[in-house]
Image (cartoon, helix red, strand yellow):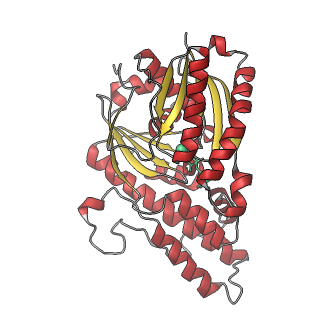
Amino acid sequence: MALILGIESSCDETAAAVVRDGRDVLSSVIASQIAVHAPLGGVVPELAAREHLKALDPCVEAALRESRTTLDDIDAIAVTQGPGLIPALLVGLNYAKGLALGHGKPLIGVNHFMAHIYGAFLDGEDHLLREKATYPLLALVVSGGHTSLVLVDGEGNARQLGSTIDDAAGEALDKGSKLLGLGYPGGPAIQKAGADGDINAFNFPRPLTGAAGKPLDPALRYSFSFSGIKTALLYHVRKFGGDDGVLSGKLLADTAASYQYAVVDTLVRKTLSAARDFGARTVVLAGGVACNKVLRADLAERLPGNIRLQIALPKYCTDNAAMVGGVGYCHFLKKEFADFNIDSFARLPKFVRVPFANSIK
Ligand code: KG4
Ligand code: ZN
């Protein structure tokens, strides 16, 4: 039995969790900074760092208290090393180093993307990560900061097939929501505003899908671009919003639904192409945008029946430390400990070894 304390601070959530054997989430505490960043319309990295500094101690204390453990019981401390916002990551990483050093615990650096993938298998499904039939596994990780397709093979090699060349999908929703006067975070706000709207009322672009009849550069087959959608929405608001640029009633609902569906349809098209091209046997949907009901339903409906769809529970879609503790356990089993001079990193490297596929049967 091993207890891992997970710590997460890559963006605007400070989180700590105690996870037993990579499976049982004994506690998962999240301090959200939404209220701090909301008036500014997005995450400010330096502000996030300062907030992490304040929130880390209470989060870790609460995670230990709720799991009825103490630091003495903890076998290792796993912390998100990257990708993410460097100022934010640094605070969590240095905090974890201090805690590990001070209490004589091994330190484990966790890749945030691999943690998002692992998060889709938390709550009893982690065994699937060790089964050969699960691979190749294709993960769509979509959040406010990331939009990436990652392929994991049965040997435990992860490769980023493509990512966004400008805005992330969540960013497109957040910025779109701001344009529509719906507030931050935009994903849930747009989902709510568009709940009764018509997804086909307006035709927003599906960038880099070839949908507009423009041939797609093969190098961009698995890449995303969401800045054009936002501009299209700006023109739409100018056209229909009158002098004050405000949409309301059915017009607002149809706009929100159509805009959201343009993002969803783009994500699903790209995922389906990649799944087909690489013979994926599992598709994982993770990251904050994976909370979106329309995305979850649309992907489930359009994915061929012979491909398993693994969607993270909403509580493990957005940033959390349980997923960090889960991956941390896999490193722990392999005795992959970090030394104390490890650094944070902002971007996902092209190739990553995943720790959870090591004992695939
Ligand atoms: O993973 P996350 O908590 O943080 C990072 O960005 O790393 O994701 C936050 C993003 C925001 O852009 C937010 O608008 C989006 O996830 N989001 C959603 C929903 N809930 C959160 N997007 C669409 N629909 C939702 N229900
Ligand atoms: Zn994330």
Q: Position of residue 281 (x, y in %)?
A: 35, 37
Query: Residue 10 vs residue 65: left or right?
Result: left
Q: Residue at x 26, y 60 (%)?
A: 219
Quarter of the figure that contains the C terminus: top left
* Residue 155 seen by the camera: yes
Query: Residue 49 vs residue 219: left or right?
Result: right
* Residue 122 seen by the camera: no
Q: Is residue 9 above or below residue 75?
A: below
Q: Is residue 144 above or below residue 214?
A: above
Q: Residue at x 59, y 66 (%)?
A: 175
Q: Residue at x 55, y 16 (%)?
A: 105
The residue nearer to you, when weighing 271 against 336, is 336
Query: Residue 291 vs residue 57: left or right?
Result: left
Quarter of the figure that contains the N terminus: top right
Q: Residue at x 35, y 19 (%)?
A: 359
Q: Is residue 174 above or below residue 24?
A: below
Q: Position of residue 28 (x, y in %)?
A: 66, 30
Q: Residue furthest bottom?
A: 243
- How many marks the image carries: the answer is 0
The residue nearer to you, when weighing 353 against 318, is 353
The residue nearer to you, when weighing 29 against 213, is 29
Q: Position of residue 87 (x, y in %)?
A: 56, 46
* Residue 96 picture quarter: top right
Q: Position of residue 61 (x, y in %)?
A: 73, 25
The residue nearer to you, when weighing 183 against 272, is 183
Q: Is residue 88 above or below residue 266?
A: above
* Residue 100 picture quarter: top right
Query: Residue 33 vs residue 291: left or right?
Result: right
